[in-house]
Image (cartoon, rainbow, N blue to C red):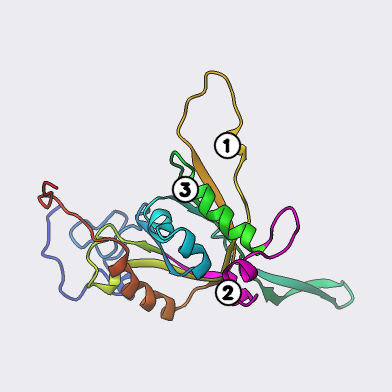
Amino acid sequence: MSLKKPSAAINVYNTDAASQPTFFQGQFQSDQIVRDPLISGYSFVKWLSVPDWVTKEYPQFKALTEKNLRAFGGLNDIDLQTFAIQEGFSQSENQFAGGAQMFQGFTMSHREYSGSPIRNAYRHWVTGVRDPVTNIARYPKDYGVEYSAKNHTGQLLYVQTRPDADNVNNGKIIEFACLYTMVMPTRIHYGHHNFTAGTNDGTELEQQFIGVPHISPAVDDLAVEQIKAIYPFMTGGEFKKA
């Protein structure tokens, strides 16, 4: 194949690229490269708010959970529900649009450390909302805070970027973003303390949350700003002796 100079009219980020006559001609157009594949593995979370009575006892909670993210789950496809109407002598069936429902909740996995800082922080949050023995909310009396959902829930931003994750001044690095509001953990982990002889492994905790998801261009814009604050990325050659 003789290589041709890439056409200036074809832009990698041009949404009309598929309409170009050279988009597909039976083989990958390596001289054009009008599209890049979506590459996973570059995802981050940023707490936008956490109850003050949680961070008062665990001031490193945000950093420890954001920078210790091992996995994020709970994103699901959204299906449009339909309903059928039968009409005519043959009772032929026709489908009409019904409703669509957003997914709810999510999970985050963290590596646990000696002393259980992850478990203890989430336990403090959960038991503050409902003590498992008395079923009473503890934080209002313990911290002098009015009982309200706004005082015991938080907000979390989940962001997936392109591989050039530290290219923070380029808004195009955002592949996906979802803002969760009314976030609250729903589990206290103890099961990982069970014992099996001959097993000596590290531990990861999968923490369950409830939360209301929001996906929109406005959330993408928020992600562009927040990604700048998630990590002070270190690149090759920047290592300095402490």
Give the mark, 1 or 2, whose residue is nearer the N terminus: 2
Q: Where is residue 58 in the image (x, y as percent from the top left)?
A: 46, 58
Q: Where is residue 211 in the image (x, y as percent from the top left)?
A: 58, 67
Residue type for callout 1: His
Residue highlighted by disc 2? 151
Q: Left of 238 or right of it: where is 60?
A: right
Relative to 44, say whether 197 is above or below: above
**Residue 183 in sight here:** yes
User: Is there CB contact under 8 Å for labels 3 and 1?
Assistant: no
Give the mark, 3 or 2, whose residue is nearer the N terminus: 3
Q: Where is residue 204 in the image (x, y as percent from the top left)?
A: 49, 41
Q: Nearer the viewer, residue 198 or 92?
A: 198
Q: What element carries label 2?
A: helix
Give the mark, 3 or 1, whose residue is nearer the N terminus: 3
Q: Which of the 4 image quadrants contains residue 226? A: bottom left
Residue type for callout 3: Pro
